[in-house]
Amino acid sequence: MTLPAADILAILPELIVMGAACLILVLDPITPVSRKEWLAWIGLGALAVCAGVTASQMGVRVMAFSDLVIIDPYASFWKLLLYLVSGLTILLSLAYLKEEAMHLAEYYGFLLLSLVGMMVMVSAADLLTIYLGTELMSLSLYVLAGIKRAEGRSLEASAKYFVLGAFSSGILLYGISLLFGITGSTRLSAITAAVHTRSLDDPTLLLALILLVVGFGFKIAAVPFHMWTPDVYEGSPTSVTAFMAVAAKAASFGAFMRVFLEGLGGLKANWHGLFLIVCVATLILGNVVAIVQTNIKRMLAYSSIAHAGYALIGVVVAGHATASSEIRSLGLSSVMLYLAIYSFMTLGAFAVVALLRKGGLEGEEIEDYTGLAKRQPVAAFLMLVFMVSLAGIPPTAGFIGKFYLFMGAVRAGLTWLAVVALLFAAVSAYYYLRVVMVMYMREPEASVTVLPRLLVSPPLAIVLACALAGVGFFGLYPDPLVALAQHAILALK
């Protein structure tokens, strides 16, 4: 059976990235160790081509493969963000893998395979297609989490991620099967039509809804499905942690919002209250537990959980029963805006963590940053900017992201939710600024004989420059990103 050319063109970016991943995996065994890092540039070239193709699709809306795949501005927005994050992660990894003496070009192949899964997730119009994309993303991340094979905690992180991920995938698939039994289809358009004819009190429908929430809640690291996050973030290589914290979260939110706001939009009365509870619980636990962390990767893990709670505010606003179409659009676009800004902040913070070394090992303890401003003023300044932005302090981009989320909550009549989020944003300032205090207001300990050293390389410098530019530029002039998000969300109205 010959596939129509239009269908092939619709998934051309996925095919390009998949082809690059397979090429890297084939060339890896026959490439000398001294030249393996050049295979990373195959991935970067593929991402550049895909960015051009996806940008040309930004203004179209087409269905492909018998309505299993949709190409629209919404999918294009997430894909462009994923290309950027993946490209910066590859550049970050070039320096990181060299320092760790990990001459594993397969690393880049699995990273690209994970990206393909994410691309499928955000452009899928069918629950099973979303599930397949989720599994491709997750299986690749399981491998990447444990790619430091000689390190016990990396293998432990991979094992924990695999076991809990497999459990959540089973729950998600069970929810999809129940929804198929109820509606007779796994396509979002058919589900949308079918749920309008069902009673909202149908227990099977409610169970399917809960199972889907559990499955997606694990992927976005929302409470109480967050238990894997701290251990996996701490044990994984720093570059992999950055990729999971940003790209996996963005792709999961992209698929999550399409399923619940497009496919299950008729059930807002059922899931709105559930999301509200999850949102508040995520905000509270993420921010409170982050306070007591002494390892910076674990602190950023709980910070990532808290940021999932902030992003859920926009989803709650979009699902509010009395919200107008304009307010729903504001809620959705604010989620997209926030996650784009979050990508710059978090990637920058992890890049600084990768930049610092202590005796040849990562300086992951917050105490390792003691007196950093006097020893490495540039690195300290970069971490200062990213910590301030993560705390949402103006004039950084983090403030803009929180401002739009809180504004949507207030306009939807959920002022109390905005107040709660604002209070815990103040709590987050404590643990973010604690890092700043350690860097700028403490002297290095006299007993420290081996100090963190800088791993300076052009690729890492590019990552830090891009992250710093994103945090600074969108903090002062967010209009282009706001307009892009507002244009992309029109497809979900």
Image: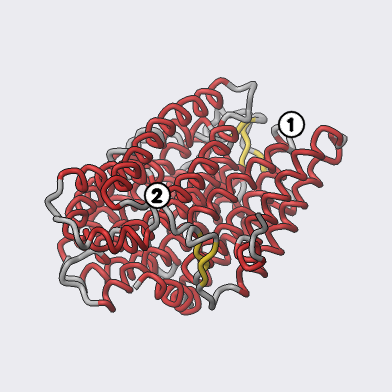
To which residue does mark 2 refer?
432
Q: Look at the picture and state if 352 lies above or below 381.
A: above
Residue depicted at 84% across the width and 34% down the height: 33
Three-letter amino acid code at disc 1?
A: Ala
Q: Quadrant of the N terminus?
A: bottom right
Q: How is the image coloured?
A: secondary structure
- Whether pointer 1 and pointer 2 mark residues with C-beta atoms closer than 8 Å, the reply is no
Three-letter amino acid code at disc 2?
A: Tyr
Location of residue 317 (image quadrant):
bottom left
Query: Tag 2, which secondary structure?
Result: helix
Location of residue 311 (image quadrant):
bottom left
Q: Which of 387 and 445 lies nearest the eye of the viewer?
A: 387
Q: Is residue 460 visible?
A: yes
Location of residue 65 (image quadrant):
bottom right
Residue depicted at 38% across the width and 30% down the height: 167
To which residue does mark 1 refer?
101
Q: Is residue 286 visible?
A: no
Q: Earlier in the sequence, mark 1 or mark 2?
A: 1
Q: Which of 155 and 131 lies nearest the eye of the viewer?
A: 131
Residue depicted at 62% across the width and 30% down the height: 147
Picture coordinates of residue 424 (x, y %)? 26, 53
